[in-house]
Amino acid sequence: MLKIPEHQVAGHHASNGTLGPLIDDSGRFYKPLQGDERGSAEAAFYKQFSSNTQIPDHIRKFFPIFYGTQVMTASDGSEHPHIVLQDLTSSRLNPTIMDIKIGSRTFGHEASDAYIAKCLKRDRETTSLQLGFRISGLQVYINDESGFYKPPRDDVLKSGLDDVRCLFRRFVSSNPAPAAVPQELEADAALASNVYGGTEGILAQLLELKAWFEDQTMYHFCACSLLFVFEKRLALEGVSQNAQVKIIDFAHVTEGKGVIDHNFLGGLCSLIKFISEVLGDCEEHKTDQEGDS
Ligand SMILES: Nc1ncnc2c1ncn2[C@@H]1O[C@H](COP(=O)(O)OP(=O)(O)OP(=O)(O)O)[C@@H](O)[C@H]1O
Ligand SMILES: O=P(O)(O)O[C@@H]1[C@H](O)[C@H](O)[C@@H](OP(=O)(O)O)[C@H](OP(=O)(O)O)[C@H]1O
C-alpha cells in the first residue's frame, strides 16, 4: 500500500492533497516528476548514471538504487510519472536524519535569470554562500514518548554559523533538547564518536566521496543534498556501520565537460572541516571530563 513518508525532512511534501513523494511496504520511494524540466532532468540523470560503467562500486553505494520510472496515481490523485527509488529509511525503525544541500551556488549557469536570482537570494540568506552548504532539514529521535526533535523548515533555513554547529551537535546527542533550555541541559553530543568518527562513520564516508570528487569530471552536482541517516539505538549500543551517507536530488545536475565540480567539492571540504571540528570538540570535552573524574 502506498503512503506518505513518515520520515521526510525537506523538499516537496505530499500533504493536504498536494504532489509529493510516496513510499510502499517493499522499501521503494516514489518521487513525482516535477512538472517543468526539473523532473525530466532528474529522471534522465538516474537513467544515465545507472548505466554508466565508469562509476566505481564504492561510489555507486552512495546513491539510492534506481528502479526506473512509473506512471501511477500520485498523492494529489492525478496519474503522474514517478521516479522509483530505494527508500533510504525503510530499514530503520526511528531514523535520525539530516538533509544538507551542498555548494555555495545552487543553480547551474544555464538556468534562467529569474531562477538564478531566486537561488542567489536563498544562497545569501542561508549559510550556503558562507559555508558552501546549508542544512535543509533534520529530525533527531528523542525517545518513544517524545518522538522526534524536528525544527520547522524556516527556522532551520534561518540558521547562522553557530546554529549550524549547534544542530550538528544535537544531531548526535542523546538529549537533543529544544531551543530555549538552560545551559546545563545543552545537547550532549554523546554519539559523536560513533556517528561522525571511526572507520565506518560519517566523516570516513565523506572522505571517500571527496576522493572521487577530486577526480571525477563527468557531472556537476548542482543543488544536490547529502542525506545522513542513523539509528540512535544502534549508536547507543556502539554498533558501527550504522550511519549512512547518501547523495540525493538530481534535478540540476549538468555535464562536467572535463572540469572538476569545484562547487560541490568546495562545499564537501567545508562540511568535512566543520564536522571534524564538532567531533574534535566533543572528544576533547570527553577527555577533560575523564581527567576530572
Ligand atoms: N530515496 C529516498 N529515500 C528516503 N527518503 C528520501 C529519498 N529521497 C528523498 N528523501 C526524503 O525526501 C526529502 C526531499 O528529497 P528531494 O530533495 O529529493 O526532494 P525535492 O522535493 O526535489 O527537494 P527540493 O525542494 O529541496 O529540491 C529528503 O530530505 C529526504 O527526507
Ligand atoms: O532549500 P530551500 O531553501 O528549501 O529552497 C528550495 C530549494 O532551493 C529547492 O532546490 C528548490 O527546488 P528546485 O531545486 O527543484 O528548484 C525549491 O524551489 P521551489 O519551491 O520553487 O520548488 C526551493 O524552495
Image (tube, grey):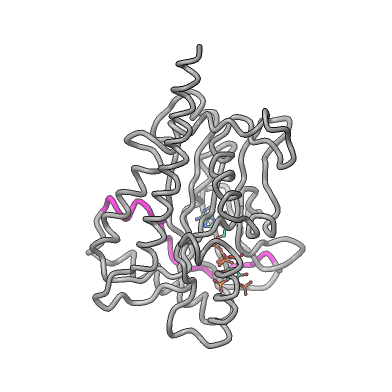
Would residue 248 appear left or right of 24 to someone viewing this image? left
How far across and down, in percent of the image, does residue 223 sit?
48, 68
Q: Is residue 42 above or below residue 117?
A: above
The residue at the point 27 percent across, 67 percent down is 52
Name the residue at the top extreme.
293
Residue extent of the magenta highlight? 57-75
Would residue 96 appear left or right of 218 to someone viewing this image? right
Q: Is residue 81 above or below residue 177?
A: below
Name the residue at the bottom extreme.
113
How far across and down, in percent of the image, does residue 229 sit?
50, 44
Would residue 233 appear left or right of 147 to someone viewing this image? left
Locate ligand 2 by image quadrant: bottom right
Magenta span has 151?
A: no
The residue at the point 50 percent across, 67 percent down is 129
The residue at the point 70 percent across, 53 percent down is 152
Residue 84 appears anywhere in the view: no
Q: Is residue 245 above or below residue 40?
A: above
Would residue 275 appear left or right of 219 to someone viewing this image? right
Q: Nearer the viewer, residue 70 or 211?
A: 211
The residue at the point 32 percent across, 48 percent down is 207
Q: Is residue 24 above or below residue 83?
A: above
Name the residue at the right extreme.
16
How far across and down, in percent of the image, does residue 112 sit?
52, 87
Magenta span has 60?
A: yes
How far across and down, in percent of the image, does residue 246 sit?
43, 52
